[in-house]
């Protein structure tokens, strides 16, 4: 599994398509409704899945652990919402923490971790 993180609009999705030969039709984009296809070749916007988890009292890292065999060969993309100013709202803080914990788990499982910044790929692992 490869994990790609970075701020909004930094080129994460395009990098995944180019670097790992992922076709647009094979990218699952998470939404706030909690739907996720763990077996997709590429899963984008994981932070939206964590927001659903926070709102539904679920642990996103546990859900990923439970489906590990399905996403082991995937490319996972997450927008970095866990840096910068700490939000005032409790839900936003919980979302930020859940996303950070999930990314910490995923980075430990990943063969490679890349951070995208201004369209540039920085290899972290």
Image (spheres, helix red, strand yellow):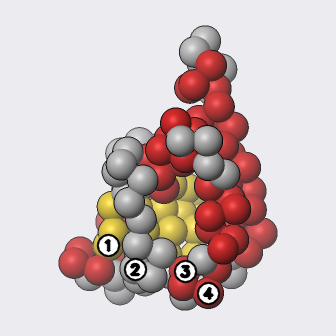
Mark 2–mark 3 distance (CA, rounded to whole Å): 7 Å
- What percent of the width, then of the height, locates residue 78? 51, 55
Nearer the observer: mark 1 or 2; the answer is 2
Quick one: SS at disc 4? helix
Quick one: SS at disc 2? loop
Asked if disc 3 and disc 1 are in contact, CB closer than 8 Å, the reply is: no
Q: Quadrant of the N terminus?
A: bottom right
Quick one: SS at disc 1? strand
Viewer-side residue, 6 vs 89: 89
Compared to 79, does 64 lie above or below?
below
- What percent of the width, then of the height, locates residue 109? 73, 75
Quick one: SS at disc 3? helix
Disc 2 target residue: 40
Q: Is residue 69 left or right of residue 6?
A: right
Disc 4 target residue: 69
Asked if disc 2 and disc 3 are in contact, CB closer than 8 Å, the reply is: yes
Give the number of the disc on residue 77.
Answer: none
Q: First in sequence: mark 1 or mark 2? A: 1
Neighbours of disc 3 within 10 Å: few (<14), some (14-19), many (20+): many
Mark 3–mark 1 distance (CA, rounded to whole Å): 12 Å
- Residue at left offset 38%, top offset 45%: 32
Q: First in sequence: mark 3 or mark 1? A: 1
Whether residue 78 is visible to the viewer of this picture, yes or no, is: yes
Compared to 115, does 92 lie above or below?
above
- Residue at left offset 45%, top offset 82%: 39
Mark 1–mark 4 distance (CA, rounded to whole Å): 18 Å
Asked if disc 1 and disc 2 are in contact, CB closer than 8 Å, the reply is: yes
Disc 1 target residue: 27
Whether residue 112 is visible to the viewer of this picture, yes or no, is: no
Neighbours of disc 1 within 10 Å: few (<14), some (14-19), many (20+): many
Q: Is residue 27 left or right of residue 87?
A: left
């Amino acid at each position: 599994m490869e994990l790609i993180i970075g701020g909004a609009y930094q080129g994460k999705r395009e990098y995944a398509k180019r670097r790992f030969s992922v076709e647009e039709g094979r990218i699952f984009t998470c939404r706030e409704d909690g739907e996720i296809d763990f077996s997709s070749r590429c899963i984008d916007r994981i932070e939206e899945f964590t927001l659903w988890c926070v709102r539904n009292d679920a642990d996103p890292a546990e859900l990923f652990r439970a489906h590990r065999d399905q996403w082991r060969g995937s490319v996972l993309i997450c927008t970095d919402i866990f840096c910068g100013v700490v939000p005032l709202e409790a839900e936003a803080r919980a979302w930020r923490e859940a996303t950070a914990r999930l990314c910490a788990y995923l980075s430990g499982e990943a063969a490679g971790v890349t951070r995208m910044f201004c369209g540039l790929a920085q290899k972290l692992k």
